[in-house]
């Protein structure tokens, strides 16, 4: 039985919003397996907890960019999670410059390692080293930062990043954590959720709404700067209508409150 009187420590996590197109971009979303205990069946952006492997000092020299500590680990974790859940790999050949992503042939060659990396049976770092790759972390732009409310038994300190998807790479769900991997416009998935045809977590929904409001990839990338990221730690409040979550107005989302009952139906 969960003890809700004690607040769990948030676990560093990473979420990736991969974009295709320009004026009417699509974003990669995956559907969580129905047998997973948290947010089963929900449409989400690829992502998950940062692992000990993502924190290893041995990563030095195996990525593009200048980052350190949690910021470095969160970016590495985001690239790893996208690889595990969709097969897309934000990496270059070791001698190639940032932005010159590997093609589908490399992704096909590494596909058999997605599950072992996901299960912790294989080091993502050692896989990158073996195939002489470098993760391209420079394409990841900070988009949002959410921390799970204090009352939840599982809490995450999640960095959201946006990035342009590599040309020529295909997305394929892993069949274990995810049962679908699709490219959809924010409007499409929001309309499906409104019609009861898709399940969205509160942070997923409002970040899709922000993508819809920004419109083009250029506008999204222009917005996605560290100075525009406001940390969101929802707090529980109540009024005559009942309990609800409140988020900071400064975060710039369409809404600042959400009925707690609606939130709990999706987790």
Image: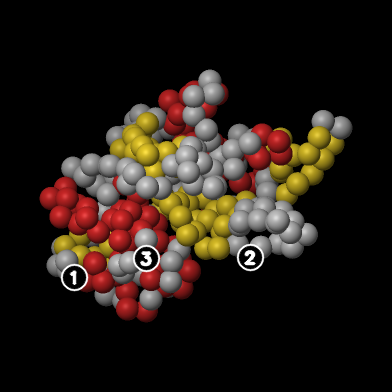
| In this rendering, position of residue 173 left or right of residue 219 | left
Residue bearing the label numbered 3: 120
The 10 Å Cα crowd at callout 3, few under 14, some 14 to 19, many 20 or more, is few
| In this rendering, position of residue 132 left or right of residue 190 | left
**Mark 1 element type:** helix
Residue most toward the top?
Answer: 195
Front position in the image: 153 or 200: 153
Residue bearing the label numbered 2: 9
Residue bearing the label numbered 1: 130
Q: What is the distance, in whole Å, between disc 1 and disc 2 at their CAs?
A: 35 Å
**Mark 2 element type:** loop
Q: What residue is drawn where x is 47% and y is 59%?
A: 49
Q: What residue is drawn where x is 52% and y is 63%?
A: 12
Q: What residue is drawn where x is 31% and y is 56%?
A: 115
User: Quick check: can you spot residue 222?
Assistant: no
Residue depth check, mark 1 versus mark 3: number of the one nearer the observer: 3
The 10 Å Cα crowd at callout 2, few under 14, some 14 to 19, many 20 or more, is few
State the quadrant of the N terminus.
bottom right
**Which sits earlier in the primary sequence, circle 1 or circle 3?**
3
**Which sits earlier in the primary sequence, circle 3 or circle 2?**
2
């Amino acid at each position: 039985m969960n003890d809700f009187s004690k607040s769990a420590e948030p676990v560093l996590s990473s979420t990736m919003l991969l974009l295709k197109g320009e004026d009417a971009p699509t974003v990669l979303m995956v559907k969580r397996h129905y047998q997973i205990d948290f947010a089963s069946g929900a449409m989400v952006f690829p992502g998950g907890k940062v692992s000990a492997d993502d924190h290893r000092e041995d990563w030095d020299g195996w990525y593009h960019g200048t980052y350190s500590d949690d910021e470095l680990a969160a970016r590495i974790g985001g690239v790893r999670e996208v690889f595990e859940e969709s097969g897309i790999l934000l990496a270059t050949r070791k001698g190639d410059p940032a932005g010159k992503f590997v093609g589908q042939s490399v992704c096909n060659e590494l596909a058999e390692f997605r599950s072992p990396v996901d299960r912790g049976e294989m080091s993502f770092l050692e896989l990158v080293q073996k195939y002489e790759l470098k993760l391209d972390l420079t394409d990841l732009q900070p988009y949002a930062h959410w921390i799970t409310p204090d009352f939840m038994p599982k809490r995450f300190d999640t960095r959201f990043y946006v990035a342009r998807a590599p040309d020529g790479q295909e997305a394929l769900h892993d069949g274990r954590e995810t049962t679908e991997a699709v490219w959809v416009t924010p409007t499409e998935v929001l309309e499906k959720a409104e019609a009861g045809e898709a399940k969205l977590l509160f942070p997923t929904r409002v970040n899709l709404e922000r993508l819809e409001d920004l419109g083009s990839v250029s506008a999204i990338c222009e917005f996605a700067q560290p100075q525009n990221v406001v940390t969101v730690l929802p707090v529980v409040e109540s009024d005559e209508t009942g309990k609800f979550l409140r988020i900071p107005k400064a975060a710039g989302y369409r809404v600042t409150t959400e009925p707690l009952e609606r939130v709990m139906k999706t987790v």
